[in-house]
Image (cartoon, rainbow, N blue to C red):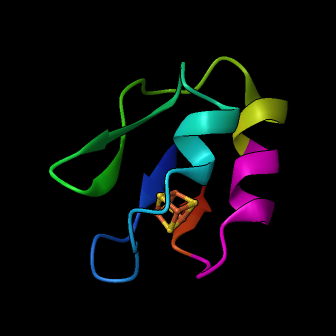
Amino acid sequence: MHFAVDQELCIGCGACAGSCPEVFEIIDGKSTVIVDPVPDEECASSAEDGCPVGAISHD
Ligand code: SF4
């Protein structure tokens, strides 16, 4: 599965990187997906559900 972070929506709260550091990293105040495709879909899906601004998506 491929994940993406909308850089316009992300507020850099760090929740995704905190709960799923193998997939998300905060770079210059915004979350970035650092693996593609994502091997641990459960972790990334939880981060997607937990994002307060809905910036994470997948296809
Ligand atoms: S949880 Fe959402 S708003 Fe927070 S850093 Fe991750 S993508 Fe950005």
Image position, residue 2 (x, y; %): 53, 41
Left or right: where does residue 53 sit relative to residue 25?
right
Q: Is residue 50 visible?
A: yes
Q: Nearer the viewer, residue 36 or 47?
A: 47
**Does residue 11 lie above or below 30 as drawn?**
below
Q: Quadrant of the C terminus?
A: bottom right
Q: Nearer the viewer, residue 52 or 2?
A: 52
**Does residue 46 lie above or below 10 as drawn?**
above
Q: Quadrant of the N terminus?
A: top right
Number of numbered markers: 0
**Does residue 43 lie above or below 12 as drawn?**
above
- What is the quadrant of residue 25 in the picture? top left
Q: Is residue 18 magenta?
A: no
Magenta segment's dominant SS is helix
Left or right: where does residue 34 sit relative to residue 24?
left
Image position, residue 16 (x, y; %): 60, 47
Residues rendered magenta in the picture: 45-54
Image position, residue 46 (x, y; %): 82, 48
Q: Residue at x 29, y 58 (%)?
A: 30
Q: Residue at x 36, y 28 (%)?
A: 34
